[in-house]
Amino acid sequence: MAVLALVVVPGDGQIARTRTTDVAAPAASTATRSAATTSTTTALPREFTLVATGDVLLHEPLWEQARADAAAGGGTGHDFRPLLAGVAPLVTDADLAICHLETPVAAPSGPTAGYPAFSVPPEIVPALADTGFDACTTASNHTFDRGAAGVDRTLDALDAAGIRHAGSARHPAEAATTTLLPVAGATVALLSYTFGFNGVPPPDGQTWRSNPIDEARILADAARARAEGASVVVVALHWGDEYDPEPNAQQQALGPALARSPDVDLVLGHHAHVVQPMEVVDGEWVVYGMGNMVARHGTPGAANQEGLLVRFTFTEGPGGWRVTLAEYAALLVVTAQPPIRVVDAGAALAAGTGPVEGALRERLQLAWERTAATVDARGASTHGLRTIPGSAPPAADP
């Protein structure tokens, strides 16, 4: 619990959904105001920040923890807010925050189930909203785990929580509708696709229920989004080989191909359950894999407890909106002892030695170092990638 005091909010885990606002400058002197009347004022360019995280993949130990957290607060059911509170400062500070909800949710009365056919507690959805997420992608290899009813329940729950979504659909008209997200004077299109569905056929043959990866279709959808008024097009892809930090052949071919399209501005990847590199292709960013935001795999391996949070600043210029700053933070799901919590590993280390000692400090350091090395494996730092200030050990802060 000592380290958690450094990275989670106190109380019941309730997160206020706030956004950074402009701070008024001190009043100008009379001389300055007089000079300003004779000079030309140039308005600052508009900009916004976009944050994205990896898989939200709920295994049984996580909802057991959420049940314990609910009981500790005097409630019933599942409270996932304390589990996620460690990422809330970064998520709520963004103008647009995107998560990936990999699994369908159960009905309020259940039943719940874990791997291989997930049906997870629905309380995860309002917890994501309270953590600050504005939209979630939903195309994954588990989208069809619970058939059409699972798709419908999941999207209904996201709607009820005020979270926009892309990647699956309840009816053909929804499948044909582009998810457009207004933010800071821009319009962001969110597109979502998956490599497959674990061999599960589309419910009742309804192929429109979710989006398989197909390069021609993705490019056509991106072009349509641009024609519908999108100033930024973000493509989220569920792809890669599980537990492999190296992009596979599909990723290495498709990622650059999409980045080179004039209709795609950012590629975000997930599914491998470990962090994969970031790179720039013709001036556009490709994030091959963000690992897990939260998961508790039965498969042994420290790397699958780690994740990547990315933050991109988009700035409007003469040629439109482009990424002008790319940043990241290393995440870790602390599972060695209860309570299970998602933490910003670098921020916990930056808080000082004090209570962050011994095996926990070593684990945080490993997560930080492995994530930093992996994201830069393709030279991302030479294109300006940096850590989010405050989310790295002091020696590594820029």
Image: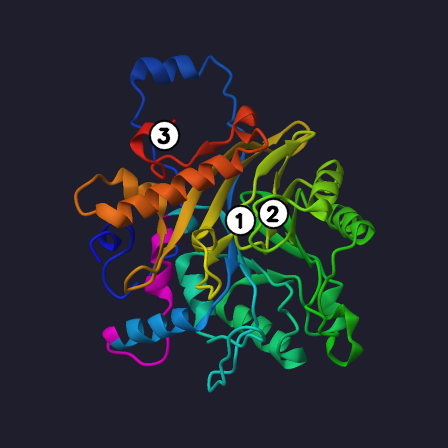
Sequence-first disc among 2 and 1: 2
What is the CA distance from the residue labelled 3 to the residue labelled 2? 25 Å
Can residue 251 be seen by looking at this rendering?
yes
Sequence-first disc among 3 and 2: 2
Q: Pointer 2: residues within 10 angstroms few (<14), some, or many (20+)?
A: many
Answer above or below: position of 16 versus 233.
Answer: below
Identity, as a three-letter code, of the amino acid under mark 1: Met
Q: Pointer 1: residues within 10 angstroms few (<14), some, or many (20+)?
A: many
**SS at badge 1:** loop
Answer above or below: position of 375 versus 124.
Answer: above
Specify whether residue 54 is painted magenta. no
Q: Residue, x 34% and y 34% (percent of image)? A: 24
* Residues rendered magenta in the picture: 72-89
Q: Pointer 3: residues within 10 angstroms few (<14), some, or many (20+)?
A: some
Identity, as a three-letter code, of the amino acid under mark 3: Ala
The residue tagged 3 is 396
Q: Which mark is residue 290?
A: 1
Q: Residue, x 73% and y 66% (percent of image)? A: 175
Q: Residue 76 carries which label?
A: none
**SS at badge 3:** helix
**CB atoms of marks 3 and 2 within 8 Å:** no
**CB atoms of marks 2 and 1 within 8 Å:** yes
The residue tagged 2 is 268
62 to the left or right of 193: left
Sequence-first disc among 1 and 3: 1
